[in-house]
Each structure stands twice: as C-alpha cells, then as structure tokens.
Amino acid sequence: MTAVPTLLWFRRDLRLHDQPALVAAAAEGPVVPVYILDDETAKQWAMGGASRWWLHHSLASLDRDLRAQGSRLILRRGKSDAVLAALADETGAGRVHCLRHYEPWWRNAQAAVARRLDLVCHDGNYLAPPGSIISGSGQPYKIYTPFWRALRGVMPPSAPVDCPRDIPAPSRWPISDTLGDWDLRPGQPDWAGGLDEEWTPGEAGGHARLDVFVDHAGRYDATRNLPSIEGSSRLSPHLHFGEVSPRQVWPRVADAGGSADIFLAELAWRDYAQNVVLQLPDYASINGRARFDALPWREGPAARADLRAWQQGRTGYPIVDAGMRQLWTSGWMHNRVRMITASFLIKHLLIDWREGERWFWDCLVDADYGNNSVNWQWVAGSGVDANMFGRIMAPLTQSEKFDAGGYIRRWVPELASLPDAAIHDPDAAGCRPDAYSAKLIGHREARERALAAAAKMR
C-alpha cells in the first residue's frame, strides 16, 4: 500500500535546517514541498519589486537543496487555501505542515486552510513564539524595553533541529509551475544589477553571511553606526525570508563575546515587532497614537515633488541622498541611515510616514511587515513605543558625527572629490557642484515647520 503523502507549505521559511515543519512532515512519510505565490491573500501587502527579486533566487536555491535530498519544490500560484486543497486532491495528501506566520494576511490564510484541511502549524521563525512573552499580569508587551528584559530571561532559545537525513518522495509528483514564468525578476529596464552584485539569496548564502559577521560581532557596538565601515550583519533579508533562523544565529553571535549582546538585543527587535503587529494587525496603516491623526501632513504638488526628490536621492542633504541611492541600487540601507532618511521625510519634509513605509516596502530586500511598520512609527513618534516627534534628527550633524564621508563618496559620486570638511554640507562650505541638488529646505526652517505642525496636534 502506498503511503499517504504530506504537504509541506513553505512561505518565509525557505530553509531545510532548523525547519520543524519539515522534520514533522518527513517523520510521517512522503513529503510534497510547495511554495504558493499568493498575492491575492496579501492584497496591498503583496511583495514589492526588490523582495520579489530575492524570492526568485531563494526559491531556486531551495529547489536545488531539495533535489540534492531526492525531493523537489512544487510551485503554484493562487489563493493558498484553494491551492493546497487542490494539491491535496491531486496527491491524496492527508495533512499540511507549515511554520506559523503572524502577519495579518497569513493568519487569515492559516485559518482558511485549517477550515479545509488538517493543518499543523509549528513555531520556528522567532526566538520565542510571538504572543508567548507576557507581563506578570498576563498581558503582552507593547513597549520594547520590558519585552526584551522578559525575553532575555528565557534565552538562549532552544537548540536548532537538524535537517532530516531522508526526505521521502511521493510515488508521483504533481505538476509545478516554472519559476521563470512568474516574472519575479525585473524585465525592461532591468534595475537589479546592484542586487545581483550585493547579495546571494538562499540558505547557503545566509550562512556564509553569518560566518563573516561572527568574526566581527564582538566589535559590533563600535562599528554598527558607521556607514562607511559597514559594521552591520546584513543578515536581515536572510532572516526575513527564513533562510537562516534566529535560533541558529543566537548561539554563534553570543559566543563572539565583546559587544555581541548589542546585536542580540537588535535581533530581539524582530520578535518585538511581531508581537506588536500580533496585537495591532493594522499597525502599518493606522497611527499607534490616535492624536497623530490630527497632524497636518503636507499634501499637494509641492509635497509630491519633495517626496519624489527624497525617493531619488535629490534632497541636497548628502547623507540622506546616499542612503536613498543605496536603497534603490542594492535593495538595502544601513540602519543608522534608515533612521536619518526616515526622520528627514517625516520631519524635514513633513510627509506622512506611510509614504516612506510603502517606498521601503517596494525597495527593500528585507521588507518585513512588522519591522517596517514598527520602525517607521518609532521615528514618526506615532507608535505605541516611539521616539518623541519633537526630537528631530539633524542629518548634517549625524553625517559628520558618524564619519559618513566614505559612504557619501560611494553613493553620491557628484561629491566624491570634496574634502571631509565639506562633504557633509557642501552648501555651507560654498562648494556644492552644479550637478548636485540644492537643499529642498534648510534644517532650521524644517525644524520650525515640524514643531508648528506638532503643536496643532495638541
């Protein structure tokens, strides 16, 4: 008698190691791994262009890894519950295993699948299951610091699980879409050249990136804020797509000593962000503090022109322009510069944080619903745990403080010949090249406008 196969539903967990759903499925018999491109369920939160580029290469890598184990990846497109139900009919599968996801659309999809099939969800994408870290009164945390204190109290996480030695194959494989037919990569124009140079998506690429970072993790606090040195781990897209798990990262970084604890606290921010969106599913669209609904954001042609200049890196503030051009070219931006560019849009240009959030969603290879919304609301001051709106970052001062001259020269070539004394603010130094944009607004003028707008909220 032929064993009944099990469906293994991949989403943002594109790995074979430390993959509890795979372990459980393989223990039951033949496994049919499947990835579904479900834009219908995600709706306005369907992946942006940079994420789709990453997805293409990550799926190709996962399929290669599965084939090396005698298996393969089945690709289908459509609504997750309908596609999985159809695959169950085609294969005779009796059960679906997956890692649990917490974005609102994935929670809806999991509920829909569970109504039609025997769905078994496992945890494995976070240090602790979102919703499991609660206060003494039994309530989930909305503020990061007590959340991190409570999470740290139950760390280290449990040990990663090994990939099964054998992934049993079904007697007959269902038909699969062809990855190239999904058109996840850009056509004409092909804007992904910088992404190709910068990244190696897939489980092997993620572990190679981790290997490099572990050697420097002990000096993390001394280098993480310096864009020109690049002390970041650059693990964020690999973590977002689940090519490496936090349980794999934690012990290796913790053993690095030095200031590695600073990085572990930032790794925990991923967990914190998921806990926020678990409590507030619409957090990417709605102010966490209702009084910000009254903030008079700029609108109209002038605001739209400023938004476009910000997107293109033409603000006249070198550190901001360098960050926005790095984002467009590589699909990523240094974390310190993310804060500077976000603050500039919100407070210097007085443009709604949601405009920036959507731009990052389309351009980032690590575009994560929880992180993106929590980070933007933190900078805006509108979040449940946020910086004060009145704390307005001074981009010119930040640029000099964090020695961003080399970073600016790389991403803003019009300024490459300027000396360190002038490159952070060529206007003030009287040597702005004709090819470089004038400032959209002066810092003092922008600050006064932002504070006047904030006063109207009161």
Image (spheres, rainbow, N blue to C red):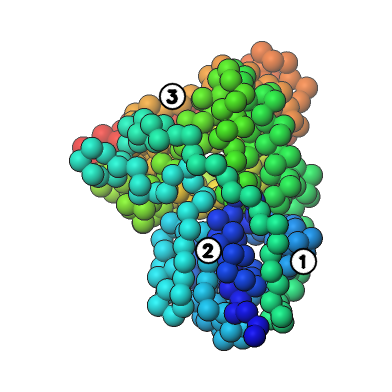
Among the two numbered marks 2 and 3 on one chain, the one whose residue lies closer to the N terminus = 2
- What amino acid is at disc 2? Cys
Among the two numbered marks 1 and 3 on one chain, the one whose residue lies closer to the N terminus = 1
Q: Secondary structure at mark 3?
A: helix
Among the two numbered marks 1 and 2 on one chain, the one whose residue lies closer to the N terminus = 1
Q: Could you say which is closer to the camera, residue 308 or residue 198?
A: 198
Q: Could you say which is closer to the camera, residue 123 or residue 372?
A: 123
The image shows residue 43, relative to residue 383, as above or below, that is below
- Categorize mark 3 by other alpha carbons within 10 Å: few (<14), some (14-19), many (20+): few
Q: Are marks 2 and 3 in contact (CB under 8 Å)?
A: no
Residue 70: which disc?
Answer: 1
Residue 98: which disc?
Answer: 2
Q: Secondary structure at mark 1?
A: loop
Residue 444: which disc?
Answer: 3
**Residue at 44% from the left image edge and 57% from the top image edge:** 103
User: Which residue is at the far top?
Assistant: 421
